[in-house]
Image (cartoon, rainbow, N blue to C red):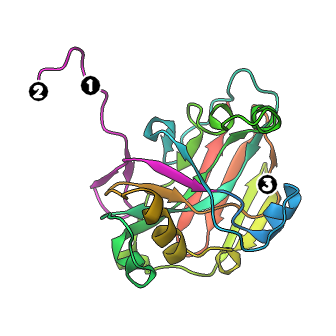
Amino acid sequence: MDYVFEASPQVCLPVQGSSQRFPVSRIFCVGRNYAEHAREMGHDPNREPPFFFMKPASAIVAGDGDFPYPALSQDVHHELEMVVALATGGSTIREADALRHVYGYAVGLDMTRRDLQGEAKKMGRPWDTGKAFDFSAPCSAIAPASVIGHPDQGAVSLEVNGELRQRGDLKDLIWNVPEIIAYLSTLFCLMPGDLIYSGTPAGVGPVRRGDVMKGSVQGVGSITSRVI
């Protein structure tokens, strides 16, 4: 292929117990998918249809990489999530078939410029500047579902400098993984390599340069990221 300039390398994630890499296509994020988090953000946690926002694949920070504190923000928040990694895709996927499309799971951070997101909300504008900025999607190695199965319960937690900030359980997801995949596939034709950040529990809050974030999802893995 004769490109006008050298193409960027494929964004990819390590796979637990393997030398293979998982190529990342797109990143979808589910908004307000834990009731307590919905409440802390000032919203009704009733089971309304799920909504989604996106981050570019280039926002990935693979493994336990550092998170550079972004410019033009004074209020950057952590949001720990279980990440769903798809091996196959499609449209209008049936809920009963959804897990067949999952390659594995990981632990991710949906880093958020809360001040810029808040300004966008007030002005009725998209959230891209608050959510889709560079390095905003740290993600651990992927644990294959063939090894760990499909976790639907287990602790989700995050510590900052050893202090517990977030704690929840996968069983408390308002929309579970099969439901998320099925609904999202009515809006987009899902593709191999797509990642879905499944939502964050309550306790989101600010980080500062020098902080160390350590998150885990029981049965999936963990992530450590230092704010620089």
- The amino acid beneath tag 1 is Ala
Give me the disc on residue 1: 2
Q: Earlier in the sequence, mark 1 or mark 3?
A: 1
Q: Real-space Cα distance between discs 3 and 2?
A: 49 Å
The mark nearer the N terminus, 1 or 2, is 2
Q: Tell me if mark 1 has few (under 14), some (14-19) or many (20+) residues whose alpha carbon lies within 10 angstroms of its own.
A: few
Q: Mark 1 highlights which residue?
A: 7
Relative image position of residue 91 (x, y in whole percent): 35, 65
Q: What secondary structure is the magenta-colored segment mainly?
A: loop
Proximity of marks 1 and 2: CB atoms separated by less than 8 Å = yes
Image position of 208 (left or right of 63):
right
Res. 100 image quadrant: bottom left
13 and 122: which one is in front?
A: 122
**Vertical relation: 66 (above or below) 216:** above
Numbered-mark total: 3
Residue 168 lies, in percent from the top left, at 74, 71
What amino acid is found at the position of numbered circle 3 in the picture? Answer: Gly
Instruction: Name the residue: 45% across, 80% down.
Output: 95
Residue placed most toward the observer, 187 or 129: 187
Of tags 1 and 3, which is closer to the observer? Answer: 1
Residue 90 pos. (x, y %): 32, 64
Q: Name the residue located 42 percent from the left edge and 47 percent from the top edge.
A: 26
Question: Which label number is shown at residue 207?
Answer: none
In the image, is residue 51 above or below residue 131? below
In the rendered structure, are the residues bearing label 1 and label 3 in contact, judged by CB atoms less than 8 Å apart?
no
Whole-percent x, y for residue 187 in the image: 47, 58
Range shown magenta: 1-30
Which residue lies under the disc numbered 3?
162
Residue at far top of view: 4
Question: Could you say whether the residue bearing mark 3 is in a helix, strand or loop?
Answer: loop
